[in-house]
Structures are given as structure tokens and as C-alpha cells.
Amino acid sequence: MPDTRSLYESKKKSIPEALRLIKSDDAIMVALGASEPGDLLSQVHTIADYGVKGVNITNCLPMNDYDFISKPNPEVITNSGWFFGPVQRKAAKAGGGHVSHVPQRLHNAGIRRMYAMKQDNRRIVLFASCSPMDEHGFLSLSLGATYERNLVDSGALVIVEVNKQMPRTFGDTVIHISEIDALVEADRPAPELPFVPFTENDAKIADFIAEKIENGSTIQLGIGGIPNALANGLKTKKHLGIHTEMLTDNMVDLVSCGAVDNSQKTIYKHKIVGTFAMGTQKLYGFINNNPSVVLNAGTWVNDPAVIGQNYKMQSINTALEIDLFGQCASESIGPVQYSGSGGQADTAIGAQRSAGGHSFICLYSTASVKNKNGEREVISKITPMLKQGSVVTLSRNDVDYVVTEYGIVSLRGRSLKERAERLISIAHPDFRDELNFHVKNHPEVY
């Protein structure tokens, strides 16, 4: 039996020693969101001191404003993000040319990027966080398995931050000390994503959706006011299950009140299934050492063919804008990247394959924006055409229910004219005449 403690000690390094393993032209892929190793990332820009150049760092939802993002040195490090957060939006807007977006869906995120980097003959390096090693030599990748385990299995150089305060989870997060090339130790709280209170409009949208969700359904929720309002509205339901890309605080509440027991799930019965977790200490405490929670690779969790196996699968996502054809712009404002595709198409398509399943796209009917004169004005988020350059995250072919605070309509199987009529009925009343006028004057389109 190998002496795992001696093996652990042999791989333990200081942060400068671990960063000395990085070579020019390496492709560093960082564990998603709250799984990122903050101490390593806070110092990774110092590889410039070792003469290292041409490194690319690919990450998703960075939780902190690291120097390699906010203080660009593109000769040394460029940054690619497959789901932008505030830090990368700010850096991209500031210019510098060192930050760029990687379009991809969650179910193949990481895999596609690794493929591209290998095409460029770059060495793949994984930066991740782990919970401490157990007596058998196993650690846990803690808050995420979206692509991290895939990279380990593909032969990446694995550098981890072993953090005493990271929760221990099960599934594809399990990793043995023999699979790790170098480790540094840390002792800091896991990054948190504050709970977002929901508004009156969030509650209205949630009420429309809750009416459609039956007892025994399996649900996928995201983050933000609308999902939080919906979770609150589902507390009276029975025997719900969870199969979702992201585990959040609101799911803990649904378990605590008895609405979620996973007893009627089709796959992984009696277990909560996700691919990563991000929230507050309430969530992290719940999933820590909890065998009823399984975090598996996004290649499986978010595969539409897998999602569709769940009975009464319900997918709930949000959009920034939708046109009268049903095209959903959920990740960009015009051509400017705002977030990412994430798992929206994965879960929306998968849910519609499910017996009794539905997909819901939610958005407020209006938004307050600055016009060309710098003045604020209210615009409709249901529009005749998407803004020029907007990215279509969910195609019109794959849209099911659309929900605003004014109602819920089904577009599945509907003609262009029927879609336009239905979407106009849930637009803000102040914009309905304008939208109807557009349809009336373009009969060749609808």
C-alpha cells in the first residue's frame, strides 16, 4: 500500500515553486467559479519574473479581480473566458486586447478549449482547488467537476491549492494524490456568491412558472432574482428532484422544507445532481461530506440526451432580449459579450426531450438603458429584431415557454405569426401597439 502522506509531502510546494513549473506557451485552464485557486491566481502574473511568455489562461466566472486580468501584460499572459463575469467585462471594455471570449456550451466547455490549445501545440495545465486529503489518499475537487476531471484524465499537468475550508464532495470531483503533480496549501474561506433578493416582478414571473411545474418534476435552476423567487414559489410542491448544472442556496431551502426529496427522479434517484456549486456558506455547509449530492462532469450532466431521461424535466433560464421570431439573446448586448452561452441550450433542448418536460425562458418586459445622448430611457426587451450583432444563445427552433411579468406563452410548434402575437401579449402594454404595427406592416415576414 503506497504511503500517501509521504507522496503528499513530496508534492507540496510554495506558490513561487509551483509557478516555476509553468513554461512559455502553456495553456492554463482554471477550475470554474468558486473552485478557482485564489492564492495561485493572485500571484500567477509573477511568472514574468522567470522569463515566461505567451501563456494563455482560460477561466470561467472569475471571483476576484486578479492582476493578470486587470493589469494586462499580454506578452506574458492573455486571458480567455467562456463565461464572462464583471471582472472580465470591465477588462474587455478597458481595452488592452488581452481578454477574449470563448463561445461554447457548458456540456463541452473545457473540452473544446483543450482541443484548440492542443492544436496549437500548447501544454495543458490545470489550476484547481481541493479539499484536504483523506486517509486513503483521496482529495476532492470540491465545488466543481464541469471539466476539471476531464482535464486530469486527459493528461494535464495538475497544480492544485489544497484549502482546509473547501467542502468535500463526491462524484467526478474525487482525485487521488498520485494524479496531482504539485500542490500548495491554503486556509481561506471558499469564494461566495451573495444571495440575490427577488423583486415583485421576479415573483410574478415565478408564479406563472410554478403553476406549470407538477409534483414529482425534476428541476434545473440558475442564479438571480427570478430563480430565487421560483424556488420560494416551489416550496409547496412535493417530491421534486434536482438535476442542474449549478447548485445554489435556493436548492438547500427546497430540501429543508421537504419540497425536494429526489424520490421520483429517473436517473440518480434520491440524489441531487449538479456539475458545480456556487453560493454562500449555507450551500457549502450543506454539500460538505454529503453523499446525497453528486457533482459529475458537464459532459454528462448537461448532455441534452441525459437531461431528457429525467421524467418531467423543467429547465428555467433567463434572456436579455427576445425578438418576435423567438430568438433569445442571453449572453451579449448587441455584439458586446456580457456573459456566456452556459448551459441554456443544453438544458432547454434536453428538457423538451423529457416526458412531461418543459423549458422556460424568463425576462423582464422592459429595461432602462442610456441612449445616444447619455439619457436613460425605457425600452422593450421583446423586439421586432434583436440588436445588431446580438448573439443568439437559444435559437427560435428550441424555444418553448417564454415568461415576463405580464404572462406566459408557449412558442413550441407555433408559426411565426402565432409567435409574434403571443409574444406581443406578454410585452409591456406601452410597447404593444408599436410591436403590432411592425407585424402588420411586414406581412411577408410573418
Image (cartoon, grey):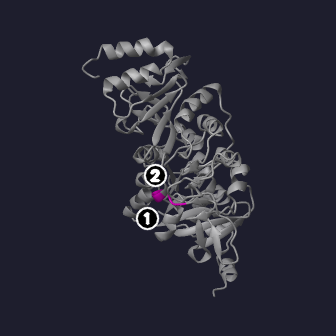
Q: Quadrant of residue 138?
A: bottom right
- Judge whether residue 273 can be spotted in this image: yes
Q: What amino acid is at disc 1? A: Arg
Q: Earlier in the sequence, mark 2 or mark 1?
A: 1
- The one of 51 and 284 positioned closer to us in this rendering: 284
Residue 359 in the magenta stretch? The answer is no
Q: Which residue is mark 1?
A: 122
Q: Which residue is label 2 attached to?
A: 307
User: What is the C-alpha distance between the residues marked 2 and 1?
Assistant: 33 Å
Residue at far left of view? 444
The type of residue carrying mark 2 is Ile
Which percent across, then down, holds residue 126? 54, 64
Q: Which portion, as a residue range, is magenta?
A: 296-300
Of helix, strand and loop, which one carries label 1? loop
Image quadrant containing the C terminus? top left
How far from the left and from the top, in percent, is residue 140?
A: 63, 66
| Residue 229 vertical position relative to residue 222 in the rendered view, above or below | above
Does residue 297 belong to the magenta stretch? yes
Q: Is residue 99 left or right of residue 46?
A: left
**Neighbour tally class for label 2: few under 14, some 14-19, many 20 plus, Cα within 10 Å:** many
